[in-house]
Image (tube, coloured by chain):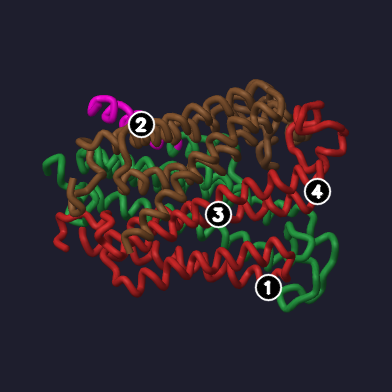
Chain colours: A brown, B green, C red
Amino acid sequence: MNSLTSALTMSNPVFVTYMIAAALGVIKIMGQGWMTVYRMMKTDSGMVSPEDVRKGWTNKNPRPEQLDVNDYVDRSRRMHRNDLENIPAFLAVGLLFVITGPSLLMTQIVMYGFVAARTAHAIAYGTKQSHEIRATFYTIGSLLVIFMGVWVLIKAFGAL
Amino acid sequence: MNSLTSALTMSNPVFVTYMIAAALGVIKIMGQGWMTVYRMMKTDSGMVSPEDVRKGWTNKNPRPEQLDVNDYVDRSRRMHRNDLENIPAFLAVGLLFVITGPSLLMTQIVMYGFVAARTAHAIAYGTKQSHEIRATFYTIGSLLVIFMGVWVLIKAFGAL
Amino acid sequence: MNSLTSALTMSNPVFVTYMIAAALGVIKIMGQGWMTVYRMMKTDSGMVSPEDVRKGWTNKNPRPEQLDVNDYVDRSRRMHRNDLENIPAFLAVGLLFVITGPSLLMTQIVMYGFVAARTAHAIAYGTKQSHEIRATFYTIGSLLVIFMGVWVLIKAFGAL
């Protein structure tokens, strides 16, 4: 592939690897919103806006305490926040990583490694595993994104 | 367009559709920050950092209760958070969707549909409409992003 | 560069400018997570999940008050949130800005200006400078992203 041909085509397996990891990351972010919705509906609590305790077809029995913090629901919001602290950065730097022309094997290790680490983090957080277990998976995901960031930076300085 | 030509050029109307939707999404995220600033200045309250209740040219009459939660200001922060849970994922997956080569009509429906759903969600949230109305627009926007995520995943697996 | 050639290659100095700014933005987001971890470990407090006050090798002396809000730790979380409100939007719109074919000088001013403004914002926030100083740097960064958003929108409408 010469430097004037785009790396961002589906005939480039390195890019296809990114497509898969990125689509999974996007689906994870959106799915976390639905986990929050599910947990709010199941417990009929954990709302955050005053108008949500008005009577309506999704809230037949409104009570002020529906606005109290509920760990079951708030846990899903914290998982969502953690996703937002990690996945959008991955999505952006992953695309640039592809353009630097890494090997397919390295791309698969870094990108599927990120997906695996974030999946394990979500399971650990959702099932209230110890801080140490959750932090281990957070660390793996974070270091993979930082690795890609430093890699892109070095390649870009080399191209100046 | 053959597989070695980039879809990411302004001569591709599918990509131009994405540019418009993405630029509007970016402007929405940034504008939400300014709505928070406006609401803080208008009510002279709703700050979140201790140093913000020091005397200064933007705070002539500092009082500790300026750090209390104020729904008028906090509503704008919740709208912002909701944007961050939806728009960055759209921005990333929308670009990949373009590269899979969808029809212009489908792209317009999905992308302008997302912009319309998020606009309606913001109006519903900002004007304190019922949870049911707000949730309907959230659902439309979320399902459109999930649709693009699944579409990209299927196309990527097909290209392996 | 004709309209069918991708702007997203390392032989395009405008794109390389984006790569540098984007990689720095990604590293900033991820680094903010590590600043929160550092501050939690240094003060042995500021946790947010109930299971984090269980005994473990990172928490030898668990106490319920470790879940209280601690400004030293929470400040890092607020910085992180502010990053998420600004940097992902920059990452997405910056890529589109490159594709519109701006001059190298303008790209450098806008993108390195964003990096500089966000760096100054982080220093001001982390060292508890006055609201006015922090707000000034926030404003510069925000306006640069909005400028790129409006620019991309105008160029896209022009290409319809």
In percent of width and height, residue B104 lies at: 21, 43
Q: How many marks?
A: 4
Disc 4 target residue = C70
Left or right side of C93 for B130:
right
Query: Which numbered disc flags the more N-terminal residue, 4 or 3?
Result: 3
Q: From this view, report whether residue B157 is shown above or below residue C36.
A: above
Q: Are marks 1 and 3 on the same chain?
A: yes
Q: Secondary structure at mark 2?
A: helix
Range of magenta residues: B142-160
Disc 3 target residue = C28
Q: Which mark is residue A20?
A: 2
- Between circles 2 and 3, the one closer to the viewer is 3
Q: Secondary structure at mark 1?
A: helix
Disc 1 target residue = C132
Mark 1 nearby-residue class (10 Å; few <14, some 14–19, many ≥20): some
Q: Are marks 4 and 3 on the same chain?
A: yes
Q: Quadrant of the C terminus of chain B?
A: top left
